[in-house]
Amino acid sequence: MIERLAIVGVGLLGGSLAKAARAHGIARQIVGVGRDPGRLQPAVRDGTLDRITTDVAEGVVGADRIVLAAPVLANEALLARVWPAAPAGAVVTDVGSTKAGIVAAAERLAAAGPGVQFVGSHPMAGSERSGYGEARADLFAGATVVVTPTETSAPAAVKGVTELWAALGARVVTLDPATHDRAVAAISHLPHVVAWALLDAVVRFEPDALAIAARGFKDTTRIAASDPEVWREILLDNRAAVTAGVAAFRRALDDLEGLMASGDGAALTAFLARMKTLRERLA
Amino acid sequence: MIERLAIVGVGLLGGSLAKAARAHGIARQIVGVGRDPGRLQPAVRDGTLDRITTDVAEGVVGADRIVLAAPVLANEALLARVWPAAPAGAVVTDVGSTKAGIVAAAERLAAAGPGVQFVGSHPMAGSERSGYGEARADLFAGATVVVTPTETSAPAAVKGVTELWAALGARVVTLDPATHDRAVAAISHLPHVVAWALLDAVVRFEPDALAIAARGFKDTTRIAASDPEVWREILLDNRAAVTAGVAAFRRALDDLEGLMASGDGAALTAFLARMKTLRERLA
């Protein structure tokens, strides 16, 4: 049982974590930290949070488990403020979509002096929606959460973070931070980049066509409505891996255009059949 | 009331059309034409089709309304066989995703001698699934159907085709064939190309990442599982417009990469916010 769970940033992910922790009864007390008390009030009124504050240092006092749920670069900045304020032995994690930056920041803080123990997490459970109003107690049920320990991580801290997500129904996968960042560049950041470019292309190329857009276009561009602040930070923080992913995408696009230009129907069918099989395997 | 509706190709679209026509009681008799009698039998057993045949000429005898629902290039070839076999005054349409080719083929046939009247249709109601097993009587309810008459189309034929789709609950939009092909290149064919290239890119770049793919990746690549035969024909038939769409996409991708490379967070946020607004307008 967690004695005091502090969640810094009570939006879609932080709010869902608070609701899930409450629903599963895994924490005696849940404290929410945010910049705007007005936005935190609904979570107090509905019984999700026991206490709220706009002061990070005050919010993490006495907390044995702390989760940073602000945008990724904000989480890195918050870590330095949490470090001296939280009790020794507290385990800190985050919910950010990039991991190398915050893990390196935690290792710099650890090298400079004792404090809390940090192990990164990335719940693959977001959506294009944002804010506490969209938070759901079952957001992590059945979702994959990537936990990113390093060789300097304390085993007890890794266990604490893993058990937190498992208790909420998630499937926990362990990757090192750099491997994680490349993997999410491929299956999350690149698809976002492609969705934004696709929407922008149609607006430039044939804007009237949006009036007849059907389910295919809507599904393909759904994530183009994702939160701009959150995604600016992800793209800038994981720029190198995203750029490598875009380069791979350009090569795949070149090859598919080559197939179309060749007019080789059999080769085109074989490629499309291979893609169909691959996609159907994902379920 | 249609006396005899002949549907050539009883897969997802043709089968759904038959089921919808039956459910709405808009045709006294429904005849299904297909290459494989074994695949047509389920539609007889469930009461959707009154009669089946593998012979196109036989299938359209006595039919006052004929719908070609095979892949696009096959529909063009079928048109030449339907033309002399169907009764004078019969109205023929199709459900293909490209229109300039088949409309031009119909105009060549009309110039060569009298026969049926053709007006193209494109119901924007497919899915990545295919086959009669996926057919649904409500597939066209609330869907957009583009009808593509030209200045040579007989008003009665345009009315007949429009009323057919409207009777099944569709919203009918009229576009000329070339405008239609450019519009669907933008909002349907380009998204498919992008989805295939995205899946192919991840397989080349970081195949292990597929194991943690979540909803964003699955939605963005859902249409990559579309039918290979159907899409080979669409891509080859609408190659020029698709290539123009891909060029617009490459320019949009270049610009977004430029924004990321610049590190200009404010400009990146402004772009992402503009895309969010555009996408949310699509509902």
Image (tube, coloured by chain):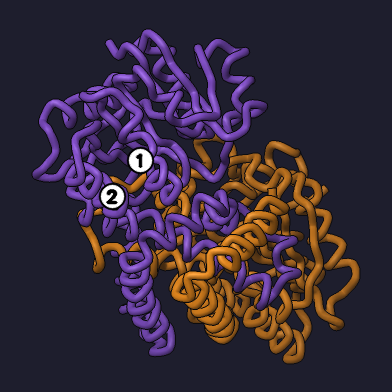
Chain colours: A purple, B orange
Chain to which the residue tagged by mark 2 belongs: A
Q: Nearer the viewer, residue B78 or A52?
A: A52
Residue occupying image coordinates x 73% and y 45%? B142
Residue occupying image coordinates x 38% and y 71%? A246
Q: Nearer the viewer, residue A181 or A270?
A: A181
Residue B32 seen anywhere in this rendered image of the structure = no
Q: Secondary structure at mark 1?
A: helix
Q: Vertical placement of A191 versus A156: above or below?
A: below
Label 2–label 1 contact, CB within 8 A: yes
Q: Position of residue A187 (x, y in %)?
A: 35, 55
* Mark number displayed over residue A105: 2
* Mark number displayed over residue A79: 1
Q: What kind of residue is marked 2?
A: Ala
Instruction: Estimate the spatial distance between the alpha carbons at disc 2 and disc 1, rounded to whole Å.
Output: 8 Å
Circle 2 crowding by C-alpha within 10 Å: few under 14, some 14–19, many from 20: some
Q: Vertical placement of A55 versus B216: above or below?
A: above
Q: Would you identify the image quadrant in which residue A117 lies?
A: top left
Query: On the rendered structure, is A91 left or right of B58?
Result: left
Q: Earlier in the sequence, mark 2 or mark 1?
A: 1
Circle 1 crowding by C-alpha within 10 Å: few under 14, some 14–19, many from 20: many
Residue occupying image coordinates x 50% and y 28%? A33
